[in-house]
Amino acid sequence: MCSVTLFGFTYKEGISKCYISFNKATGFKKARPERLPETSDKSRILNTANGDVTLTIVDGYRVLYLNKKKVPFVNMKVELSDPANYKADQQNILENLKYLNAGSTGMESKDLIQLDYNGFKVYGLSRASIESGSTLGTFVMFPGNNTIVYLYFNNLNPELSNFTSIEDYKAQRNTFIGEYTAYLKNCK
């Protein structure tokens, strides 16, 4: 019990442990999940083309996946939406991603990228080059149970990076998403 208090990692009913326990990512080591502090805001404002909208957050965790140089390549956030707002929160997140993508230059696509892995739909935006930006890709999935999974793929300086080209980044991104969703599909 003391270690739970010291490290701030407690499992709260609602977010399935499956979402934060994936530890078999090829080439990456999972860091210890960090729970959203109880005192954190229970909502967040998102910008969309139609104005600001509110996203509900009941609970959440962050899990980093570190490359061999011990630098985070994947920043995964798992949040629990208020059940009464889950559908609206999904739509608001997608509208926010569309807004961000439309307002950014050098993106892979003018539309949101849609990936299908292991029965899960993953939506996001991604840069067309590794030459700029601190985040190369931002992806989200809605696996049900009022859960939202965000995957942020960090751009890294060449000396800290685990990729050497945009194609290499995309291959690692897609491998991670594929392995994570395969894990979710079979996790009990």
Image (cartoon, grey):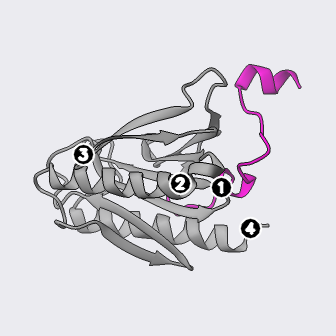
The mark lying in front, picked from 4 and 2, is: 2
Q: Which residues are magenta?
A: 1-28
**Does residue 111 appear left or right of residue 188 in this picture?**
left
Q: Residue at label 1?
A: 19
**10 Å neighbourhood of mark 2: few (<14), some, or many (≥20)?**
many
Q: Residue at label 2?
A: 149
Q: Residue at x 33, y 42 (%)?
A: 160
Q: In the image, residue 167 lies at what x, y percent?
A: 25, 69
State the CA–CA distance, disc 3 to disc 1.
30 Å
Secondary structure under badge 3? loop
Asked whether the residues under the numbered discs 4 and 2 touch, taking CB atoms below 8 Å apart as contact, a structural biologist would say no
Numbered circles on residues, count:
4
Which amino acid is tagged 3? Pro
User: Which of the two discs, 1 and 4, labels the residue nearer the N terminus?
Assistant: 1
State the CA–CA distance, disc 1 to disc 4.
9 Å
The numbered mark at residue 106 is none
Q: In the image, residue 104 lies at what x, y percent?
A: 15, 50
The mark lying in front, picked from 3 and 2, is: 2
**Does residue 128 appear left or right of residue 70 in this picture?**
left
| 180 lies above or below 57 | below
State the CA–CA distance, disc 4 to disc 2.
15 Å
User: Which of the two discs, 3 and 2, labels the residue nearer the N terminus?
Assistant: 2
Asked whether the residues under the numbered discs 3 and 4 touch, taking CB atoms below 8 Å apart as contact, a structural biologist would say no
Q: Residue at label 3?
A: 158
Q: In this orientation, which residue lies closer to the viewer: 106 or 171? A: 106
Secondary structure under badge 4? loop
Quarter holding the N terminus is: top right
Which amino acid is tagged 2? Val
Q: Residue at x 25, y 48 (%)?
A: 50
State the CA–CA distance, disc 3 to disc 2.
28 Å
